Image (cartoon, grey):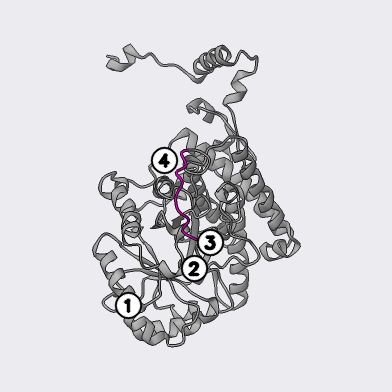
């Protein structure tokens, strides 16, 4: 007996859909190649169809390449849920301690802390800041001056003399090998970090963001293995930190792609599988707007959903007014901090996105985008390696030139009609709040940008 719905809605294949789409496109546009208008010429160097079915997977490279569907899905996170890790900039350790403890009582599972550059008395600061917060139960991730990392870790081990959870969310530096050894007895405290934020905030495409982050990790591992650490020591201590933008499905695919790329990269060291690297995601600063700042909440919610569906282990949702905060106001935004924290809570408690691992697995569209991003990013990564790695590519200006082209292409897209809600459309005039001072913005030679800057 046929299912009820199959008698009402007979099966069709993609060719039927294409015929109908071609007819309707011609009726609207009256053009021979009207279907071409439905194709998405992405900024990532490949074209996407408007619609994918099982037919597209028959004899497709996605099934026969080294990043076939099975390989893509094997590389993904298979555990449920994520850590809700709001970010705070520390200005007064005693009052900030109350804020942190309140956040943990109201839905936060972990913390991301921006520490001041000057840590003249780190023992006093940490003992007051972490009073009542046990790092063996609550993971805490720190942003700090890389030159202070060794002293900081020595002090932290004195203040919290037990196994630590969390890590350092800063790109590797000269102290990384030492702090990795210092925390060898805390396997859940990550000390090796490769982040995409500097590239993302300079205007990178998803392909560039993936390739440059992988190249950054390659340089880091090269330095650390020369310093005497083994790859088996490094992988469990590694965290990859990614910014997540507003392009919903491609951002989901980007996060799935980074896991595939990392698995392929690590297979060069050993054919045996390594433990999965921790993936921290944060909502984008690049797409935030200073005008009509409430629209940033819409962006952050979309970005947070993409991060969760893409498989993040730790999620930081930035407050919607972060872009207009000044250094004097950083601890005076209780409402926006609470809303940011609750975005993650709602995705768990009301959307139940913590009930399934890799929910996009099997989606013809997302699997295809993931595959295309992996292949495009891998080719760019190999090109960077031929130039001597990320450091040499930065020194030659290659990375900067690539990012500048990408940024200008994004700006031109907006000039040509792409809507930035609250900036180019639905804008509400608001009093100026002044320019914010981003905390711990370790951008090196790459500028931190926002897409809406030229339109505000």
Q: CA distance from mark 3 to mark 4?
A: 24 Å
Q: Nearer the viewer, mark 2 or mark 4?
A: 2
Q: Determine which residue is flagged by label 2.
A: 439
Magenta-colored stretch includes residue 432? yes
- Write the residue at 52% across / 76% down: 145
Q: Quadrant of the N terminus?
A: top left
Check if mark 2's residue and mark 4's residue have beta carbons within 8 Å.
no
Q: Which mark is residue 130?
A: 1
Which is more N-terminal, label 4 or label 2? 4
- Label 2 vs label 1, nearer the camera: 2
Do residues under tags 3 and 2 come within 8 Å of each other at their CB atoms?
Answer: no
Q: Secondary structure at mark 1?
A: loop
Residue 359 image point, x, y percent:
38, 42
Q: Residues within 10 Å of mark 4 (few under 14, many from 20)?
A: some
**How far from the left and from the top, in percent, is residue 123?**
39, 86
What residue is pinned by disc 4?
360
Any part of residue 43 in sight: yes
* Magenta stretch: helix, strand or loop mostly: loop
Q: CA distance from mark 2 to mark 1?
A: 20 Å
Graded by Cα atoms within 10 Å as few (under 14), some (14 to 19) or many (20 or more), the crowding at tag 2 reads some
The correct choice, above or below, for 225 with respect to 357 in the image is below
* First reached walking from the N terminus: tag 1 or tag 4: 1
Q: Which of the two discs, 1 and 4, sits closer to the camera?
A: 1
* Mark 1 residue crowding within 10 angstroms, few (<14) / some (14–19) / many (20+): many
Q: Which residues are magenta?
A: 426-435
The mark nearer the N terminus, 2 or 1, is 1
Mark 3 vs mark 4, foreground winner is 3
Circle 3 Cα neighbour tier, 10 Å, few/some/many (<14 / 14–19 / ≥20): many
Q: State which mark lies toward you, 3 or 2.
A: 2
Label 1 – label 4 distance at C-alpha: 38 Å
């Amino acid at each position: 007996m046929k299912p009820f719905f199959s008698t009402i809605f007979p099966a069709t294949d993609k060719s039927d859909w294409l015929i109908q789409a071609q007819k309707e496109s011609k009726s609207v546009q009256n053009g021979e190649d009207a279907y071409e208008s439905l194709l998405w010429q992405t900024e990532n160097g490949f074209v996407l169809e408007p619609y994918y079915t099982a037919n597209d997977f028959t004899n497709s490279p996605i099934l026969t390449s080294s990043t076939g569907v099975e390989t893509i899905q094997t590389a993904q996170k298979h555990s449920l849920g994520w850590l809700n890790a709001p970010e705070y900039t520390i200005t007064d350790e005693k009052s900030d301690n109350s804020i942190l403890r309140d956040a943990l009582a109201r839905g936060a599972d972990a913390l991301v802390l921006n520490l001041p550059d000057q840590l003249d008395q780190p023992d006093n600061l940490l003992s007051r800041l972490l009073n009542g917060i046990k790092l063996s139960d609550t993971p805490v991730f720190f942003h700090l001056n890389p030159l202070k990392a060794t002293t900081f870790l020595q002090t932290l081990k004195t203040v919290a003399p037990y196994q630590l959870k969390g890590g350092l969310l800063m790109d590797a530096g000269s102290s990384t090998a030492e702090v990795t050894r210092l925390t060898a007895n805390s396997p859940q405290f990550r000390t090796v970090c490769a982040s995409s934020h500097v590239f993302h905030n300079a205007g990178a495409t998803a392909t560039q963001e993936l390739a440059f982050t992988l190249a950054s990790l390659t340089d880091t591992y090269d330095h650390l293995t020369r310093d005497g650490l083994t790859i088996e020591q490094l992988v469990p201590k590694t965290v990859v930190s990614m910014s997540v933008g507003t392009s919903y499905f491609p951002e989901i695919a980007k996060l799935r792609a980074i896991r595939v790329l990392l698995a392929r990269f690590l297979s060069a060291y050993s054919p045996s599988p390594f433990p999965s690297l921790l993936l921290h995601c944060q909502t984008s600063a690049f797409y935030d707007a200073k005008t009509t700042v409430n629209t940033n909440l819409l962006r952050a919610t979309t970005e947070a959903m993409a991060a969760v569906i893409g498989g993040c282990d730790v999620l930081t949702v930035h407050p919607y007014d972060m872009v207009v905060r000044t250094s004097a106001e950083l601890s005076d935004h209780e409402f926006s901090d609470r809303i940011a924290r609750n975005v993650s809570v709602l995705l768990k408690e009301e959307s139940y996105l913590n009930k399934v691992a890799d929910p996009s697995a099997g989606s013809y569209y997302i699997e295809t985008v993931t595959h295309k991003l992996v292949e495009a990013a891998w080719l760019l990564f190999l090109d960077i390696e031929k130039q001597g790695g990320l450091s040499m590519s930065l020194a030659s200006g290659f990375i900067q030139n690539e990012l500048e082209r990408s940024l200008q292409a994004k700006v031109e897209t907006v000039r040509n009609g792409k809507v930035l809600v609250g900036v180019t459309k639905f804008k509400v005039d608001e009093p100026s709040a002044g320019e914010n001072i981003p905390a711990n913005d370790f951008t090196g030679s790459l500028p931190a940008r926002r897409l809406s800057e030229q339109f505000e």
